Each structure stands twice: as C-alpha cells, then as structure tokens.
Image (tube, coloured by chain):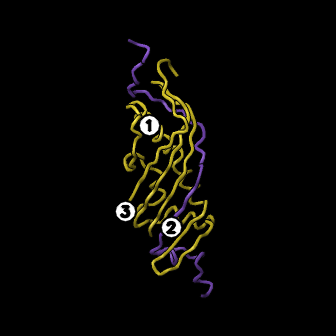
Chain colours: A yellow, B purple
Amino acid sequence: MGGGPHTKWDSEHLILTITGLSGGWTLEHLGSIKLFDYAQVQWPSDWDHFKIDATTRILEWTWQANGWLVLDTTISSGIDWSRKDGMGGSMQVDQQLKAHLWQRPTSSLDLSVDFKLDGSADHSGFKGSGSANAELTLHF
Amino acid sequence: MDENSSQLSEPDDWLAGAEVVARAQEISLGDIEVSLDGIEPPPDPNVA
C-alpha cells in the first residue's frame, strides 16, 4: 500500500438486501451476480465518498470470490420450510437436496447479507478481513 | 405413503409451492486484499 491518509473499517457492518428476484432465479445465478447491480444498501451517514466507493469494490470482489461459499454455507446450516397447506418443518440438508436447491428455479428469491469488515485502506488498496451473516428465502 | 412418494427422495414433490428459509452466522470470508486503483482518495489532512 502507498502513503497518504488511511481509512479504517473497525468491525463495521453493512447490510445488503436483494428482494423479489423473480422469474426463475437459481442459487447458482445468485452466486454469480455483480452484487451491487441487484443489492440495496443503506450507507452510514458518516462515511465519505472514498469509504463508500472502496467498500463497494471490496464487497463486489468478496462476492465474486466468496458468493458461492456464503450461499452454500447458508443452506448447509439447515432450512425451515413451509407450504400453504400447513406442511412444514426444519431439516438438515444432505448433498442430494443441496444440489437440488442450487439448481431448481425459484418463483422468487430474497437474500440479506450482513457483512462485517475489519481493515484499512489508502488510495492503492484495502487490506483486512471479513465475515458475513446471511438469510436466504426461496419460494418455489 | 409408499417408498416411491418419500418426501426426501423426491424433492420436487414437497418443494412445489414451498417457502424455504436458511440462515447462517459468522461465515468467515478470510483475508481480503483489494486494489482500489481508480478510486478517488480522501483529502490528506496533512496537506494544506
């Protein structure tokens, strides 16, 4: 990294939401999108343009590198399912069901990801680490 | 219910019309290094 002023991310959270993707979206598609083409975000009011632009690039890169990991980890944690006929329950997801969930087209799909970033940046680059909490809702 | 209509062996049968919700906490994204080339830097407070 070069010199100049540094901007820090101190366990800062940013929640991105994608709602109402309809018309046959699959998890495979969702894991491959350009995140900010679809996500809505409420930027903290005290962030300057540099921090917003930098975070946008960081999270775009992070989703390209880890989007499938986030989705796979999320469905691997188990699912709650329900139907209008009153059937439903909670269950673990085996490999067969996971493969099916990855590829089955949805009637609509929602995703919320709470990213947490730690690190610092100057004009040349960001260096740090991150984690995510995710909630995924699929309608079939 | 016979064996051929088992919920788990035929996901289509029970997922049709279903809402499925999944959640995960603290998914590690590991170390992150990203170039910020082209992004306008903030003003340096040490420069008049």
Residue on which the image places disc 2: B20
The residue indicated by pointer 1 is A57
- Expressed as whole percent of the image width and height from the top left, the position of residue A36 reads 39, 45
Q: Do tags 3 and 1 sit on the same chain?
A: yes
- In three-dimensional space, the C-alpha distance between marks 2 and 1, rounded to whole angstroms, equals 30 Å
Q: Chain of mark 1?
A: A
Q: Is residue A72 left or right of residue A107?
A: right
Q: Which chain hosts label 2?
A: B
Give the mark, 3 or 1, whose residue is nearer the N terminus: 3
Image depth: mark 2 or mark 3 in front: 2
Q: Quadrant of residue B23?
A: bottom right
Which residue is at a point 60% across and 49% down the rendered structure image?
B26
Residue behind mark 3: A22
Residues at marks 2 and 1 on the same chain = no
Marks 3 and 1, how far apart in space?
26 Å
Label 2 SS: strand
The residue closer to the viewer here, A121 or A25, is A121
